[in-house]
Image (spheres, grey):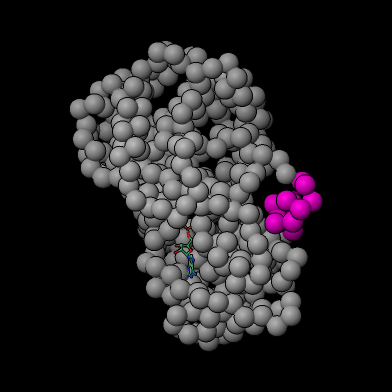
Amino acid sequence: MRDRADLVIIGGGIIGLSLAYHLARMGFTEVAVLEQGYMCFGASGRNGGGVRQQWTTEENIRLMKDSVRMFRAMAAETGYNIWFRQGGYLFLARDEETAGYLERSIKVQNKVGVPTKLIQPNKAKKIVPGLNIDGVKVCAYNSTDGVLFPWPALWGMAKVAQDLGVEVNTFTRVTDIERQGREIVKVITDRGSIATNRVVNAAGAWSVQIGKMLGVELPNKPYRHEILVCEPVKPFLNPMVSDLSDGTYFSQTMRGEILGGISDPLEPSSMETKASFRFLNRMCRSMVRLMPELSHVRVMRQWAGYYDETPDGHPIIGRVDEVDGFIQLHGFGGHGFMMAPAVGKMAAEWLLRKTDHNWFSKYDLGRFARGEVEKETFVIG
Ligand SMILES: Cc1cc2nc3c(=O)[nH]c(=O)nc-3n(C[C@H](O)[C@H](O)[C@H](O)COP(=O)(O)OP(=O)(O)OC[C@H]3O[C@@H](n4cnc5c(N)ncnc54)[C@H](O)[C@@H]3O)c2cc1C
């Protein structure tokens, strides 16, 4: 492991690796990525692989258009097939309030060039044969959203960054960070230390612990989010289906498995990753209600990862007041994977002072103290 770096990225999840990948492609390679476990150990190796452009604000929709463009090119650019399949996303609304909310969001999406349509339930049934539309008022469907297999996206980004000169160290846990006054001097790990003045906190659900090492208090909270996968069946399900009344979502992988999760309003904040019977029960009931024929399909496995949540549902990115060179890049809740390509590129441009993206002042940690908080509402799962 190197003993000096211009930049140390803590966290080898999709966010840290996407930043490393884009920095390397822009020619900045004096970078060390430190990951405490194996690659895919965190949320990035445990998620549903959903990629949607159906958001409520213009900036998130534009960001996700960029991400989709990058996911489409990723296999060719990295040499790793990420199995990105644009089968669409279908949201179901069961009450007037949600229906109105979909309608308003679609107007913004269309304005930005995302072709989402508000469709009647019987049309949705044509797109998803076997869908139970009882009680569904209206649906939002965008055929250009999709799903992917997360692991090769991490492998590919890490490989390209490494080939260009970035050091990616797995099984290397950061135990402390030393500073002199406002300046960072050294990152200490269980495999030795690295002298540096700049550190990116991309540690996902562990970011609060990294912040503490430098005396920076972060408001993020980790929540267990569970997910399951059923045995493979012949491909029949094109879009990701998501019921907004209870946050159920499921899609079919390119191997034929049905994969999905559900929100749980009773889940407390914790660093728990055990699988629960409560989830299995709620998820199976919800899937079978939405698609009765799924009652014949057996569950193969269930697991859990963390949603790294912030008080307003937006990430925390950019500088902090207390320490120079301590950059935040975390708090991506249940949507960090889909945003990672565009966020990593934006962060690389901002760090190298190529473009001054306003995201890094708008979504910095200081917004909570300034009271400049606007809650994101389109949060699924
Ligand atoms: C079940 C589930 C389903 C999801 N579904 C979707 C989805 O469909 N679409 C989507 O876009 N998002 C989804 N998400 C969210 C998405 O997975 C996350 O937002 C994203 O992976 C966050 O990436 P990250 O790099 O910030 O965090 P992580 O992937 O968690 O990476 C952070 C890394 O930091 C490392 N680390 C922590 N502390 C240290 C330390 N002291 N030293 C060294 N390394 C350290 C950790 O080991 C970890 O690997 C889902 C999440 C879960 C759990």
Left or right: 288 as drawn, with respect to 213: left
Where residue 186 appears, x then y in whole percent? 60, 82
Front-most of 342 and 319? 319
**Can residue 70 be seen?**
no
Q: Which residues are magenta?
A: 356-372
* Looking at the image, residue 211 lies above or below residue 222: below
Farthest-out residue, right? 370
**Residue visible at 46% across and 73% down?**
173
**Residue visible at 45% across and 69% down?**
35
Left or right: 336 as drawn, with respect to 238: right
Task: State the image quarter where residue 312 is shown.
Answer: top right
**Can residue 264 be seen?**
yes
Left or right: 149 as drawn, with respect to 342: left
**Residue visible at 40% across and 15% down?**
133
Where residue 304 appears, x then y in whole percent? 37, 49
What is the number of callouts on the image? Answer: 0
Front-most of 28 and 283? 283
> Is 95 a magenta residue?
no
* Looking at the image, residue 128 lies above or below residue 3: above
